[in-house]
Image (cartoon, rainbow, N blue to C red):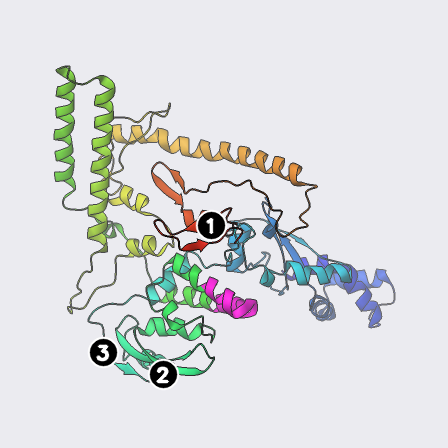
Amino acid sequence: PKKMALELFKPFIYSRLEAKGLSSTVKQAKKLVEKERPEVWDILDEVIREHPVMLNRAPTLHRLGIQAFEPVLIEGKAIQLHPLVCSAFNADFDGDQMAVHVPLSLEAQLEARVLMMSTNNVLSPANGAPIIVPSQDMILGLYYTTIMREGMKGEGMVFGSIEEVQFALDNGDVHLHAKITARIPQIDEHGIEIEKRFETTPGRVRIGALLPKNAKAPFELVNNLLRKKDVQNVIDAVYRYCGQKESVIFCDQIMSMGFREAFKAGISFGKDDMVIPETKWSIVNDTRGQVTDFEQQYMDGLITQGEKYNKVVDAWSKCNDKVTDAMMDTISAPQKDDNGAEAEPNSVYMMAHSGARGSVTQMKQLGGMRGLMAKPNGDIIETPIISNFKEGLSVLEYFNSTHGARKGLSDTALKTANSGYLTRRLVDVAQDCIVRMHDCGTENSITAEPAVNDGEVITSLAERVLGRVAAEDIKVPGSDEIIVGEGQL
């Protein structure tokens, strides 16, 4: 905001006003600035040019919590932030506050520009994967753009260039999701431009047009349905092979495209987009039958209370999984529209499948069954919640689910304290630890394994080992082929 810049850059403005002869004393300069005279704004523009400012969002948990930016003056009273750096700051637009610092000396400005500029911080310090990755709306837009559907307008058309595809799209001769064949310029391994034919869609051609020209960033990268992970892989490849400048520009373009296409697609959802599978009640009734059998076996003294409890809980969680699978099968199956062409995918499914927002677990609660709940002491209640949010819960079901909802909130609040304290101790320990060798040659190592919570994989093994060094040769199981050698990243 202009008002903020005026306050922060005051000393620079005073000296510039005096240098230009618009004021003879600091007192006069102060008066000019307070009155916000037109010449003051012109001078502010000059002062601010090429002068980076540092933005910080509390809590600063890693070094990307403070980054430098080129300021752009705006009307209004709120700081406007680039969407791609939000994940590094863990910021969102619901009223977060950020601190702005002005580097004063020339050395400080130089350091801010060279080391802290947001364009120089593409990779996460945790594991070396790109951190300026689109999320939410952008992912939804890119996913929607790369969908391929049967029987759309313009299916089977052949195009000679990217421009022709764009022209046909603008004219409405071909649908964004139609199957087409297009000739797209590629770079071969000798660096020579060649033309290649691809079975693709106009939407994918559009994204392909943004890719930097490089043999290691071929059109195949984007010639499929782009989910969050795929977009991350594309950005990773572009960064690795095309350099930092190219990848920053590419991310910016792909962000704009994601937002624009998500907006044009107009994806939203109503209650009818929550699909309850037809087989739900038959699955539930089968399970009820099994549970009655277990109760009877317990009454007859064939099994103990503990065995009965385990069997019942197991039966219900299997039932829950079956209902979820049935729901996902129904919701992801291609439907036909009135003209016999393939209809647009279900919007809730698109949001979850693309990785934009929501998960299968949340869809299960909306359209499947809520499943088993925990008691305050952590035990699982034997009777599950069979209803989902679309059907509505009974009074007892609602009461049973209140504990879990409250526990979730209190856990979140209590967990932060522990992790904060651990960080604090780690920083204290590592304070005077200096790295001066590329490899210290230690024999010590740790075993990496996927992070699993309640049977759900939170971080896969691949994500856990990214950016770490192998302690011994890692081979393909059952053969001598080495994937990663000892001491390799």
Q: Does 229 sit left or right of 14 as displayed?
A: left
Q: Which residue is mark 2?
A: 161
Residue at 35%, 71% in the rendered image: 204
Q: Main secondary structure of the magenta part?
A: helix
Q: Does 280 sit left or right of 78 as displayed?
A: left
Q: Which residue is mark 1?
A: 473
Above or below, 285 relative to 44: above
Marks 3/2: CA–CA distance? 15 Å
Between discs 3 and 1, the one toward the N terminus: 3
Residue nearest the viewer, comparing 310 with 119: 310
The image's mark for residue 156 is 3
Q: Amino acid at mark 2?
A: Ser
Evaluate whether residue 383 shows in this view: no
Q: Amino acid at mark 3?
A: Gly
Give the magenta-colored segment's residue range.
235-253
Between discs 3 and 2, the one toward the N terminus: 3
